[in-house]
Structure formats: structure tokens, C-alpha cells
Image (cartoon, helix red, strand yellow):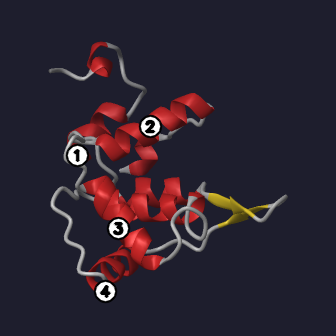
Amino acid sequence: MARLDSYSGYPSGMEEYLSHYGWHFSKKMCEWAVSKMYRTDGVRKVRIDPLSKDKVEELLKRFNIVLQNNKGYDAVYVANMCKADYLGRSVRDDAALAQFVMDTINDPDGYEGMVFTRFYADCIGSGTPIDWEDMM
């Protein structure tokens, strides 16, 4: 089955990005996306202290988590998104964070590029433009 968005034109530079990384996060795209993440402390928006790829890999190793479907920086994006939105709330601790990353990346009814597709849909929905040429 073809993706529904394969029938319309892409923004400038997006086709080149996809030709290099597919529907997955490059290092630059992940860093940019994570730089937009924040938590709230009741009233204020507070930027998160991002988890690097090395830190995410250490976290997963500490809890014996193996990712079968990870590509590029997808797991790094998921870990940071979880940290920004759920950690300390519905995701109580680092063990649950590692499990969340595994559940998302290894989702048995997921599809190729699911994490990046959801991110891109959020950008469309929030009106956040992506400078695709800068993400190469």
C-alpha cells in the first residue's frame, strides 16, 4: 500500500532529505526537533536537557532493551519526546522510559517510518515549518 502523502508535492528539499534518510530522523533533524521540546513546571515552559544518542544507548543497555526496528536517530527522538511529555508523570522512571522507547520503536503493528511520520504530522498540525535543506 502506498503512503497517502505520496500523491502530492513535497516542500522544497524534502525529497532530497527522504532520498538520504527515508522517513527517519537524521542527526540534524533530531537535534532540531528536540531543541523545540519543553516541559511545563505549572506555568513556565522549560527546555529539556536533551538525551544524546550515546545516553539513549546507555539507558537501553542498562535495562537490557534491544531495539529491532530502530533506524537513524528515531529512538533518540522518541526518548527525548517521552522525557519532555511523560517522564515523571505517566512514565515514572528511567526503566519505564526505556520500555516506552522499545514499545514505540518495536511496535508490532507499526510501520516503516512511523515515528518520523508522526513528528511530521505534528509539524503540519502546529504550523511549524521545516527547512529541509538545513537538515542534510
Task: Tell me which residue sits at (35%, 17%) in the image.
Answer: 9
Residue 36 horizontal side relative to residue 28, left or right: right
> Which kind of residue does numbered mark 3 sit on?
Gln
> Which kind of residue does numbered mark 4 sit on?
Arg
Query: For residue 120, which numbered disc appears in the image?
Result: 2
Cα separation between marks 3 and 4: 11 Å
Q: Earlier in the sequence, mark 2 or mark 4?
A: 4
Q: Earlier in the sequence, mark 1 or mark 3?
A: 1
In the orientation shown, which residue stands out farthest toward the right?
Answer: 43
Where on the picture, by quarter, is residue 77? bottom left
Cα separation between marks 1 and 4: 31 Å
Q: Are marks 1 and 2 in contact (CB under 8 Å)?
A: no
Q: Nearer the viewer, mark 3 or mark 2?
A: 3
Task: Say what secondary structure mark 3 lies in.
Answer: helix
Quick one: label 4, few (<14), some, or many (20+) residues within 10 Å? few
> Which kind of residue does numbered mark 2 sit on?
Tyr
> Which kind of residue does numbered mark 1 sit on?
His
Task: Tell me which residue sits at (59%, 37%) in the image.
Answer: 128
Cα separation between marks 1 and 2: 17 Å
Q: Earlier in the sequence, mark 3 or mark 2?
A: 3
The residue to which callout 4 is attached is 62
Q: Nearer the viewer, mark 1 or mark 2?
A: 2
Cα separation between marks 2 and 4: 30 Å
Cα separation between marks 3 and 2: 23 Å
Query: For residue 99, which numbered disc appears in the image?
Result: 3
The residue to which callout 1 is attached is 20
Task: Say what secondary structure mark 2 lies in.
Answer: helix
Whole-percent x, y for residue 135 in the image: 41, 50
Whole-percent x, y for residue 67 in the image: 20, 65
